[in-house]
Structure formats: C-alpha cells, structure tokens
C-alpha cells in the first residue's frame, strides 16, 4: 500500500478561515450572568451593523442575551437585525422578549404593530 505523506497545513496570511463576525463558537460557551460582557457584545454587534455585517451582529446580540437575559436593548436590536435578515420567527421571538422586559418603552407601540405584521 502506498504510504500517505504527512501534509503541512497551507501557509496563510494569519487570517482565519471563518470570518470572525460569523464565528458562532461563542454560542456554545458556558454563560453566566455578566451584564458587562452582555453590554460589550451589544457594542460589538453595533459595530457589525455599522459595517453591514448583519449575521455577525445577530450572533453578537444573541451572545449578549446569553450573558444577560434581561438586556432589553440586546433583544430589541436582535429583533431589528433578524427582521433585516428576513427571519420573521426569530424577529418575532426577540421583539416579544423585548416587550416582556420593556413594556412601557418608547419603542413598545411600534414593536407591537410590527409583531402584528409579522404574524
């Protein structure tokens, strides 16, 4: 039998194969209540939105909700991004959680209308 020669991994310029904004590995991490980490994830998500990387933003907002389930801002922004990504079920779930956490917010009436439209 011919012996397989060992291959060395191809040399790269140090870039990851998976763009960091699409790396979902953090969603498998153990998350405990950490409001500072949650807020940091929201800020990273905002950065991705500004750069047009909506999928990366969605992952970061999800991460923020895993660190702090009561982060209404993260749920609101997750709903907006999921809507732009054309995932009405995910948007609806995020908006519903947002309304549960912030029923009297200034965005609440508009979100209630969106929820009706998404049904």
Image (cartoon, grey):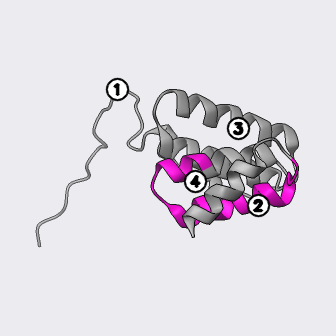
Instruction: Answer with the quarter of the image where residue 105 lies.
Output: top right
Marks 2 and 4, how far apart at CA: 24 Å
Q: Is residue 43 magenta?
A: no
- Could you tell which of marks 2 and 1 lies nearer the N-terminus? 1
Magenta-tinted stretch: 80-104
Tag 1 secondary structure: loop
* Residue of label 1: 13
- Could you tell which of marks 2 and 4 lies nearer the N-terminus? 4
- Could you tell which of marks 1 and 4 lies nearer the N-terminus? 1
Tag 4 secondary structure: helix
Marks 3 and 4, how far apart at CA: 17 Å
* Residue of label 3: 42
Marks 3 and 2, how far apart at CA: 16 Å
Instruction: Answer with the quarter of the image where residue 119 lies.
Output: bottom right
* Residue of label 2: 97
Q: Which mark is residue 56?
A: none
Residue 37 lies, with reference to residue 29, above or below; the image says: above
- Could you tell which of marks 1 and 3 lies nearer the N-terminus? 1
Q: Residues within 10 Å of mark 2 (few under 14, many from 20)?
A: some
Observer-side mark, 3 or 2, equals: 2
* Residue of label 4: 25
Observer-side mark, 1 or 4, equals: 4
| Residue 101 screen position, x and y as percent | 86, 55
Left or right? Give the position of 7 relative to 106: left
Camera-side residue of 9 and 39: 39
Q: Residues within 10 Å of mark 4 (few under 14, many from 20)?
A: few
């Amino acid at each position: 039998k011919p012996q397989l020669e060992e291959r060395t991994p191809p040399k790269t310029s140090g870039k990851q194969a998976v763009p960091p904004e699409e790396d979902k590995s953090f969603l498998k991490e153990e998350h405990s209540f950490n409001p500072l980490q949650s807020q940091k994830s929201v800020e990273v998500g905002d950065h991705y939105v500004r750069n047009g990387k909506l999928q990366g933003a969605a992952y970061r907002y999800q991460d923020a909700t895993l660190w702090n389930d009561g982060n209404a801002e993260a749920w609101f922004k997750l709903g907006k991004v999921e809507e732009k990504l054309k995932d009405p079920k995910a948007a609806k779930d995020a908006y519903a959680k947002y309304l549960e956490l912030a029923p009297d917010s200034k965005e609440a009436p508009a979100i209630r209308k969106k929820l009706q439209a998404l049904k």
